[in-house]
Amino acid sequence: MHLIVGGGVVGLSVAWRLARAGTRVTVIDPAPARGASHAAAGMLAPVSEVSYTEESLLRLGLAALERWPAFAAELEADSGLRLDYRTQGTLDVAFDTDDLAALDELAVFMDKLGLPVRRLTGRECRRREPMLAPSVRGGVLAEGDAWVDPRRVTAALLAALEKAGVALVRRRVAALVRDGSAVVGVRLEPPSAATGNVPADATDGGRADSPNGRPIDASDGGRADASDASDASGDVLTGERVVLAAGAWSGGLTDLPVRPVKGQIMRLRSPSPLLGTCVRGVVHGSPVYLVPRGDGELVVGATQEELGFDTTVTAGGLYELLRDARELVPGITELQVADVVAGLRPGTPDNLPLIGPYGPGLTVATGHHRGGVLLAPLTTAILHGEEGELAALCAPQRFQTAGQGSD
Ligand code: GLY
């Protein structure tokens, strides 16, 4: 039995891959699919999100992007659900002269890296996206970038896991249980405390329903299926391996340097899609992105705030998003507000994830920061030994000092 701690896009993907390979799996999460994955926009945009200091992250992102078509097709086939996976690219636009100069410089850097991008004038940007403001000065089109609806992805993963008979325990993990240096299981918090850290918008208690409207686990938290892994009190689950995919909470369960990075995001709704491409922009120095869904939803994101485990949605955060998004696409002010939410990205000191074995009995798959959705298929591949070179970039031991650690 493998115990997967964390039911976000990474934990559920790992569980799905293991279950498909015939491994017995239990997923443990007080509110599956209601954390960072619920807040994510779902940009699969390693090219347009490239930065000067993060070439390793670019390599991971490009490898992950290549895996997405097969991942999406398999998940849709297995779950019977659509993901709204789209491949129309990302248009990075500049608003004023300074933003344009910065974008020009970035385009030169992208060219040097051999990335497939095309420079567009302001007029060409508007021809492609007529709703862009007349003041947009120019852009860079990354035609290979894609995007997906993360809420559909996690719903599909949950449905696929349900079909595979995977148990889901709706409890929070208080600690890893060790026997000497080996991790042999997890200790659960009492059920009453289980929803203590769910995101602010999870007013339904975070219950993720299956496609047929039924909760996907029994009200006993999947205990019936997981009973062979629990002790007499039901508060300890044991397994041959624990996979820690607890996102921003991973740092509290290990010595891994994972910290929460808050993101506030907004979903707007229009009768028909306002944009055909994913649009990113820098407005007076501050970044914003707009991600269109097939059903007319437009996701506007996201703030980046270092405020610990705070998931309040603030007027200031939403103001910032709307102010900048309106500069790029003035028509958004007409749209209905469908949803606002704050999530916690699991940040690491070098912005690279932590993936791989971390001492006897423990594997980690966390620290995906701004790229959990993009990197999920690559994460499962790394854990299955398919990407040796990239795995080295994600080695969880890289922050350990001599004498410290779990291995
Ligand atoms: N990947 C976009 C974000 O984290 O806001």
Image (cartoon, helix red, strand yellow):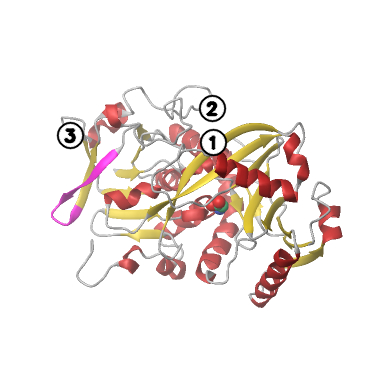
Residue 290, percent from left and from top: 67, 47
Q: Considering the whole magenta stretch, tell me its main secondary structure.
A: strand
For disc 2, the marked residue is 211
Within the image, what quadrant is residue 331 found in? top right
Q: Is residue 65 left or right of residue 131?
A: left
Q: Amino acid at mark 1?
A: Ser
Label 2 lies in ligand 1 vicinity (Cβ under 8 Å):
no
For disc 3, the marked residue is 231
Q: Are marks 1 and 2 in contact (CB under 8 Å)?
A: yes
Q: Is residue 202 above or below residue 346?
A: above
Residue occupying the point 84% across, 48% down:
130
Residue occupying the point 35% across, 45% down:
23
Q: Amino acid at mark 3?
A: Asp
Q: Nearer the viewer, mark 3 or mark 1?
A: 3
Residue neighbourhood size for the residue with mark 2, other residues' Cα within 10 Å, grouped as few (<14), some (14–19), many (≥20): some
Residue 107, percent from left and from top: 70, 70
For disc 1, the marked residue is 79
Residue neighbourhood size for the residue with mark 1, other residues' Cα within 10 Å, grouped as few (<14), some (14–19), many (≥20): some
